[in-house]
Amino acid sequence: MAYADQSAYLLPALCWCYLYSVFFVGLNSVNLSIDINTVKGFLDPEEGRALYDAANQVLALGPCLEVGSYCGKSTVYLGAACLESGSTLFAVDHHRGSEEHQLGEEYHDPDLYDASIGRMDSFKAFRKTVQEAGLEDVVVPVVASSRVAARHWATPLSLVFIDGGHSRDAALTDYRSWSRHIVPGGYLAIHDIFPDPEAGGQAPYEIYQLAIASGAFRALPTIKTLGLLQRL
Ligand code: SAH
Ligand code: MG
């Protein structure tokens, strides 16, 4: 009788554990096969999660592309979604760093500086991340400036993530070069959106507004500083 009493509690408890793991843990973690905290970069985990979710929704429409990979943080999130759906991520970065990464600038990292040529080089760290995350058959590194990589681009894209240079010129070039390749229903994601000029540079926010004003995109809720738009 005592045994029957215990089992009466056991079943609901097991059900609860199962539901908890499926709905709570499952919804809040991404299986990245790498400790994301070991990857240098500038993406908040919530933003990474949002990128992963957005990619999962549209990857059936085609491959995706990011501008600005640095050491591969965003690459890991987008790549994880591609891995699951058998898709491909083109990762565009000249790996020479943005303005703020250069020697003497605020976000300069001496570990990523090649003193023999006096230039930044994040490509080695990027490759290591991609290899450790098991994404070598998913990620195609395009080691070139966004402008050069886009020159002959003709492949329709399901999602474009812009996180490259933050000068007005660089942001505009990224927007003009890549947004036109997004298929209807696909996503344009833009990092470092700061509607308040006191909080951060305005170039990413400018292209975000340009996208809305073009009438070709509708804005979805922003996740921290990650602007998300859907191609109409
Ligand atoms: N997405 C990364 C952070 C990117 S930092 C993360 O999740 O951590 C910005 C990156 O953009 C730098 O690595 C820099 O080399 C690259 N970049 C800047 N301007 C570029 C351009 N015009 N073309 C290609 N890459 C560029
Ligand atoms: Mg950024």
Image (cartoon, helix red, strand yellow):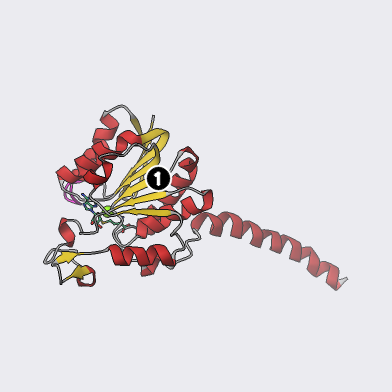
Instruction: Pick the residue in front: 178 or 203.
Output: 178
SS of the residue at dot 1?
strand
Q: Is residue 42 left or right of residue 105?
A: right
- Residue 15 visible in the displayed image: yes
The one of 109 and 204 positioned closer to us in this rendering: 109
Q: Position of residue 122 (x, y in %)?
A: 26, 64
Q: Label 1 neighbourhood size at 10 Å, few (<14), some (14-19), many (20+)?
A: many
CB at mark 1 closer than 8 A to ligand 1?
A: no
Residue under the point 34% across and 60% down: 72
Most distant residue in the front direction = 152
Q: Picture coordinates of residue 59 (x, y %)?
A: 47, 43
Q: Residue shown at 19%/51% (left/top)?
A: 200
Residue placed at 16% from the left, 64% from the top?
A: 119
In the foreground, 110 or 5: 110
- What is the three-letter code of the residue carrying label 1? Cys
Is residue 25 highlighted in magenta? no
Of 185 and 21, nearer the camera is 185
User: Which residue is identified by label 1?
Assistant: 64
Q: Main secondary structure of the magenta part?
A: loop
The N terminus - image quarter: bottom right
- Number of labelled discs? 1
Give the residue at x 28% y 39%: 152
Position of 130 relative to 59 (above/below): below
Res. 220 image quadrant? top left
Residue sticking out furthest to the left: 104
- Horizontal and vertical percent position of residue 199: 20, 52
Q: In the image as oriented, which residue stretches furthest toward the top?
A: 215
Query: Magenta stretch?
Result: 196-201
Q: Residue furthest right?
A: 1
Asked if residue 195 shows in the view, the reply is no
Which quadrant of the structure image shows residue 20?
bottom right
